[in-house]
Image: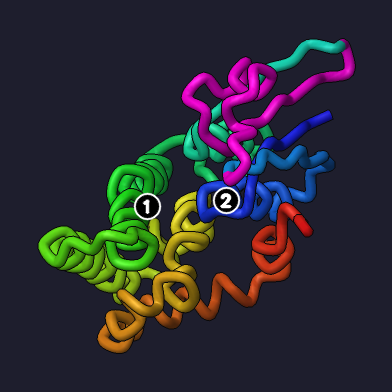
Amino acid sequence: MLTLHTWTTPNGRKIPIMLEELGLQYTIKTVNIGKGEQFQPEFLAISPNNKIPAIVDTDADGNSVSIFESGAILTYLAEKTGKLLPASGPERYEVLEWLHWQIGGLGPMLGQVGFFAIRAEEKSALAIQHFIDEADRLLGVMDKQLSKHAYIAGAAYSIADIACYPWTVGILDKLKPALGDKLETKPHLQRWLNMIGARPAVQRGMALPKVD
């Protein structure tokens, strides 16, 4: 049995998408970060950095492994099933390059845009412009890559696309007041967003976890 601990954030939706793409059976335990549930001892036991998502994978003999950090979870699930990450060779490292690009760059920068430009009560024009400029630069990097390849890491759909999609699609929604016009000059990124968003497993995963 595989249990996913997650919430309705871009990072939190990467793993439901992955699990839906793989067709694995799993259960979801919601971790309401707005209520501080990520600090509960039982969650900290599997995610010591108090961040979602995290998984616990238990086999038929009762042996279990717990994993936190979305990139580690995506890699684990890909290797467990032999899907969405090449087993070896240059193609494997191209996927891992773009996976880590999202984790270290795109996600944090879009997150800072969301905080400084939208959620923060006290606005800092310098911070807002800095993070918008850096986010736009990263989106340009992505658009250039997608001008040469169907998917973010090359010819095949992979965990790199799954990692990037929940963050990037947010530009059409929560981040639109700050970044909405930035997509107008990035046709290849728009194409990719439409293509990934049309996948049934992505649609199902983006609707999870279901909360009231």
SS class, disc 1: helix
Left or right of 169, for residue 67: right
Which dot marks residue 86?
none
Q: Quadrant of the C terminus?
A: bottom right
Which residue is nearer to you in this view: 3 or 99?
3
Where does the image place residue 145, in percent across and percent down from the top left?
A: 29, 67
Q: Which residues are magenta?
A: 34-61
First-in-chain label (2 vs 1)? 2
Q: Is residue 169 above or below residue 134?
A: below
Check the picture and name the quadrant holding the N terminus. top right
- Could you say whether the residue bearing mark 2 is in a helix, strand or loop? helix
Q: Quadrant of residue 153?
A: bottom left
Query: Which amino acid type is shown beneath numbered disc 2?
Result: Lys
Q: Is residue 64 above or below residue 99?
A: above
Q: Position of residue 139 (x, y in %)?
A: 28, 68
Among all residues in the image, which is located at the extreme left?
126
- Which of 121/197 is in front? 121
Q: Residues within 10 Å of mark 1 (few under 14, many from 20)?
A: many
Q: CA distance from mark 2 to mark 1?
A: 12 Å
Q: Residue at x 55, y 28 (%)?
A: 68
Q: What residue would you read off at disc 2?
A: 14
Marks 2,1: beta carbons within 8 A:
no
- Return the x and y of residue 56 as percentages of the image width and height: 71, 25
Question: From where the camera sits, is residue 171 visible?
Answer: yes
- Residue position marked by numbered label 1 in the rendering: 107
Q: Position of residue 167 (x, y in %)?
A: 45, 60
Task: Compare residues 136 and 49 and report the one nearer the observer.
Answer: 49
Q: Does residue 157 belong to the magenta stretch?
A: no
